[in-house]
Image (tube, grey):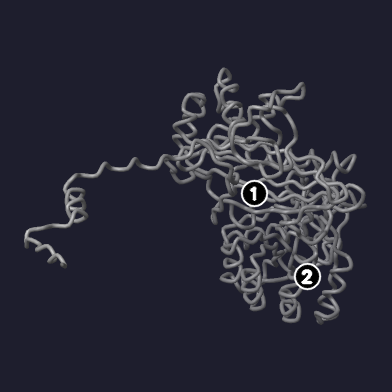
Amino acid sequence: MQRPAPVRSPFTIPLVVIVLFIAACVPMATPPAPQAPTAVIGTPPSRITHPTSIVDMTTRTAGITPTVATWQYISGAETFNSKLDTRLLSIFDARAGGRHQPAALPATPAALLADGVSVTHEIVLATGSLVGSRFVQTIMDGGVRIARSDEITYEDLSTGVVTGSASLIKPAMTGTLRTMLGDTMGPASSTQTPGPDPTRAPTTDSVSDAELLTAVAFTSAGDLSVTIHRDPVTGAALSGPVTVTLNAAATDEVISPAGQTLRTAVITGAPLKAPQPAPGGLAPVNCDLVPCAALTYDDGPNAQTTRLLAILEKHKVFATFFQQGGYVRAHPGVAKAVAAAGHTIANHTMSHPYLTKLSPASIASEVQGAQGTIEMATGVVPAYMRPPYGATNKTVAASVGLPQIIWDVDSMDWQSKNKSVFIPRIMSLVKPGSIILQHDVHASTVDGQGELIAQLKGKGFYLVTLPQLLAGIELKPGASYKCRGSASGCVAGR
């Protein structure tokens, strides 16, 4: 006999529902917030760009001791830039086995030479008056890296005081930091897997504190960043540079007072208090380091000068204009525009005579007349003069009262009036330190300037004004100068 099915009460609730209901009524414990890792292996601080004050440079040499270098100036920070120049020149001189001579070679800012030395300087911190610089040297042989060094230093632009990376760490705590780095590094290998390795032990070749702490920095969050090339425990060389970032809480006890001050500045992130940037025609460039050439234009100003100014602005090039007083008087607005654009204005006499045919008084009158006319129109007092036709002698030298700037590259543009003729002529004659003669009164000359500038830059030349080209050279009134460098007839810069 079949039993009847049990009758369910309308108030019967399944057990699973009861369990879910109770669970919903019991408050859940809040899960702990994820903790930042004590350390991670990542990338070193990156370079900082600043459109108004940081100037990128690059140069290279060839031959048996090739070198390539890229670096960053701070426009207006003369002490900072001078220290950087000194360091770069010492490297280049050492490689050359004597005095470095700039070479006109196409720029290769991102290249790592297969054979030779590659140098990189980049600004990785710019806040308040503090600037952090990362300096890297890599030596390659047959495509194999045989040495590399990383160094980060900090300079207070207001005082010129330079602080090294090691001073950011308490001397008594370097052992603690070494242990933290070692635990993060784990086994020294090409993969650089983080994690402690109890099997490692120091060797007789252990890395010193000085070598360990050459590249120390802080992230914007205050974490400590250390770039190393050798295992901090064993001293074994790593397959490549490794940057370990340790969080702020874990490293607070190892940071020195100087380090704490720097870390606070980095976290605050105040804008850089850079010196007033130099005008374009005076921007930092060292023609002992890089291949320079100066574009100079004679006989203006006139309507063609106005066209030329637009071309130079388009190509971000600054030049030197040797102006005649008579034309300045006729076109004062054009002369003023040349000065306002940041170009250098120099003296080309009042009426363009052969000075060698004049008396001392007439020579002085020609020069002084142009000086006064140019100053009245532009507010500029010229620091150089160029004798018309390059004609000079002892009488002229004794009468002009200004350094005489001649040239070593004569374009002969006035003769050919054809850019397909004078551009190849210039390119065949130009060398690092050259002063190039052209005339801005000819439409054909102006027509060829864009192409000429592109070719000169493509060959690796920095196109500069005379104040830039002749910087560091004592110029004497009446003396003649035609180029910078060690070539015959040129004047050495150092």
| Alpha carbons under labels 2 and 1: distance apart | 24 Å
Identify the residue shown where x is 44% and y is 34%: 264
Label 2: state its secondary structure.
Answer: helix
Q: Could you tell me if residue 372 is visible in this image?
A: yes
Q: Is residue 24 shown left or right of residue 139?
A: left
Identify the residue shown where x is 63% and y is 41%: 193
Which is nearer the eye, 330 or 411?
A: 411
Name the quadrant of the C terminus. Answer: top right
Cβ atoms under marks 2 and 1 closer than 8 Å: no
Tell which circle, 2 or 1, labels the residue nearer the N-terminal end: 1
Q: Is residue 115 shown left or right of residue 183?
A: right
Residue 181 x, y percent position in the rendering: 60, 31
Instruction: Please state which amino acid type lies under the numbered disc 1.
Output: Gln
Q: Is residue 71 shown left or right of residue 392?
A: left
Instruction: Please state which amino acid type lies under the numbered disc 2.
Output: Gln
Q: Residues within 10 Å of mark 1 (few under 14, many from 20)?
A: many
The residue pinned by badge 1 equals: 72
Residue farthest toward the top in the current orientation of the protein: 172
Which is nearer the eye, 27 or 79?
A: 27
Residue 490 x, y percent position in the rendering: 87, 51
Which is nearer the eye, 317 or 442?
A: 317
Residue farthest toward the front in the current orientation of the protein: 1
Q: Could you tell me if residue 401 is visible in this image?
A: no
Vertical side of 164 occupied by 128: above or below? below
Q: Identify the image quadrant of residue 357.
A: bottom right
- In the image, which disc is placed on residue 455? 2
- In the image, which disc is placed on residue 100? none
